[in-house]
Image (tube, grey):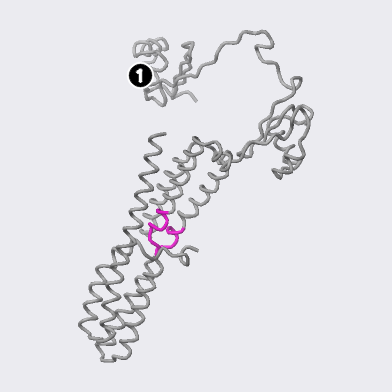
Amino acid sequence: MAKSVIAVSVIFVLILIGSIGGYFYTDNMVKSYSVRLDKALENPDVNLLKEVEQNWDKDKNSLMYLMNHRDIESVSTSLIRAREEAAAERYDMAVQEIAVAKFLLDELIEREKLSPENIF
Amino acid sequence: MAISFVRTLISYALVVFALRIMGKRQVGELQPSELVVAIMISDLATIPMSDPALPLLSGIVPILTLISAEMSASLLSLKFPKIRKALTGSPAVIIKKGIICREEMRKNRYNLEDLAEGLRMKDYFDVDDVYMAILETNGSLSVIPKSGARPPTSDEAGIKGKQQTLPHVIIADGKKYPEHMQEAGVNDDWLKKQLSDRKITNANEVFLLTVDGDKKVTLQMKNKE
């Protein structure tokens, strides 16, 4: 009996810590990229986009444990498109792609929120 | 492909662990809440298995949550009878003193065909033989027959029966089980004597050797079909 109570409590606590920790980790990580894309929207510089893309490629591996892989790959695709458009000096198209990437990131944050809309 | 293979192995281990934790009941004897949890666990495990885009954690976390919830519910049921009643319901007396209780049957949505089937499963083919029938919370039927419809017990027949004991497996497929020998109250010398009495030189040749409470030995050799 005592063993079962301990086992249940440990599992509950681990799930709780893991879920809350995971939420804050993904939230902070994704928000930081959203802020960086805000800057890129004002100035679609190819170097800035390259840097964001390289960092995203590293950080997305840890996000894959917690989020839908397809959503993460969609952000990667948009970042590549934005970088290529900026490299070709098609800045209006680059801004469009950056806006799409930012929207996808904001959606990732929204989807992880513990809100009634997401629960039901 | 390799990802699906590894994910399947992990999910399999988790589901086995989950069902093992839930207890040793057979599927047909599951309480309603346990049945729901078993179905949900098996379903949850297949989702990340079949869709590699989903993190494996999206299956693991709900499964662990269900296990914890189920364990909490069963622990609370042990402590509080009201919770037990709410979770598993209470047994219903379907036949009382030989009379079928229609009201109880209606409450449990249990029809006469179900009753006849349940009785047949218990080897009672005539409702008239039954004194009491109780529909248990897991859906099985417990039956108390009328005194004339059951064989007499040894006490009723005035026979002093001998208490049956569980035979202990001492050797299985050539492997000796010292812990079983200890439980049966025999030692290596006893075993050596039993084998030498039967002209067996090596315990490896023995397929099965059991001993019961009266030290009666049952033996079968490996080479004997």
Name the one closer to the observer, A98 or A58. A98
Residue A64: x percent and y percent?
A: 33, 64
Q: Quadrant of residue A76?
A: bottom left
Name the one closer to the observer, A80 or A104. A104
Residue drawn 37% across the image and 22% down it: B177
Examine the structure image and report whether residue B53 is included in the region drawn in magenta: yes
Residue B93 sits above or below residue A110 on the image: above
The residue that label 1 is drawn on is B202
Chief SS of the magenta region:
helix
Please state the chain letter of the residue tagged with numbered disc 1 in the rendered image. Answer: B
Residue drawn 40% across the image and 43% down it: A8
Q: Residues within 10 Å of mark 1 (few under 14, many from 20)?
A: few
Residue B173: x percent and y percent?
A: 41, 26
Residue A25: x percent and y percent?
A: 29, 63
Classify mark 1: helix, strand or loop.
loop
Q: Is residue B219 left or right of residue B35?
A: left
Amino acid identity at mark 1: Asn
Name the one closer to the observer, B83 or B45. B83
Q: Please provide the residue range marked out in magenta.
A: B47-61
